[in-house]
Image (cartoon, rainbow, N blue to C red):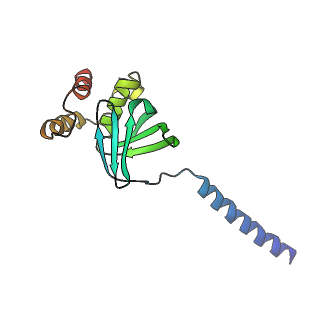
Amino acid sequence: MMAGFAAAQAIGNASRRRQAAEMAQPRWVPIDHGTVAVSNFGFYLHSPTGIHAWNWHSIHMASLVGPGQLSIDGVSENGPIKWILHSDWAELVFMLWASVCNPTHPQMTDRTWLPQDWMTKAMVHAMSNQGYPTHFAFQEVVRELR
C-alpha cells in the first residue's frame, strides 16, 4: 500500500511540476489592436482604448524579429514595457527609430532585416496615400539605404 501511495504521489508531483514549468514560460499575448501612424518624432497606436504616443527616445531597444514584427523595450507612463508590434509598418517604425536613436544598430547597418520588396512597397504606398510620411525623415532614410 505504501508503494502505491508513493507512486501516485510521484505522478501527481510530476504533473504539477510540468504544469508549473509550462506556466513559467514567457508568452506573447495580444493586448490591443488598431492602427499605427508614424511620424518624424515617434509612432502612435490608435486603438479602441485611445491613442498611445511613443516618441523615439522612450524606446531603449528595438529589433525586427520577423516580417512585420518589431520587438520594443522601452519606458511607458506606467513603467518598463516589452512589446512586439505586429504591423505592415513595423520595418518603417524600426528604420526611423534606428536612424534617430541607434544608427549603428546591426540590423540597420547590414540591412539584412529589410525584406527585398519592402522599399518598393513603402515608396508606392507613401506616394499614393496622403496620410503616410512622404517627406523629411522617410525620404532621408530611404536616400541613405540606396
Q: Nearer the viewer, residue 16 or 97?
A: 97
Q: Is residue 29 visible?
A: yes
How many numbered badges does the structure rendering display? 0
Residue sticking out furthest to the bottom: 1
Q: Nearer the viewer, residue 80 or 110?
A: 80
Q: Does 42 sit left or right of 74 as displayed? A: left
Q: Residue 115: percent from the left, percent from the top? A: 28, 37
Residue sticking out furthest to the left: 128
Q: Nearer the viewer, residue 116 or 132?
A: 132
Tell me the quarter of the image containing the C terminus.
top left
Vertical order, 44 against 6 (above or below): above
Q: Choose top left, top right, bottom left or bottom right for residue 87.
A: top left
Residue sticking out furthest to the right: 2
Q: Does 120 sit left or right of 98 as displayed? A: left
Q: Does 120 sit left or right of 73 as displayed? A: left
Vertical order, 12 against 145 (above or below): below
Going 15% across and 41% down the picture, which residue do you hit? 129
Going 42% across and 35% down the picture, which residue do you hit? 63
Q: Residue 13: percent from the left, percent from the top? A: 73, 64
Q: Residue 17: percent from the left, percent from the top? A: 69, 60
Q: Residue 90: percent from the left, percent from the top? A: 33, 40
Going 33% across and 41% down the picture, which residue do you hit? 44
Tell me the quarter of the image containing the N terminus.
bottom right
Q: Nearer the viewer, residue 2 or 33?
A: 33
Q: Is residue 68 visible?
A: no
Going 82% across and 74% down the picture, which residue do you hit? 5
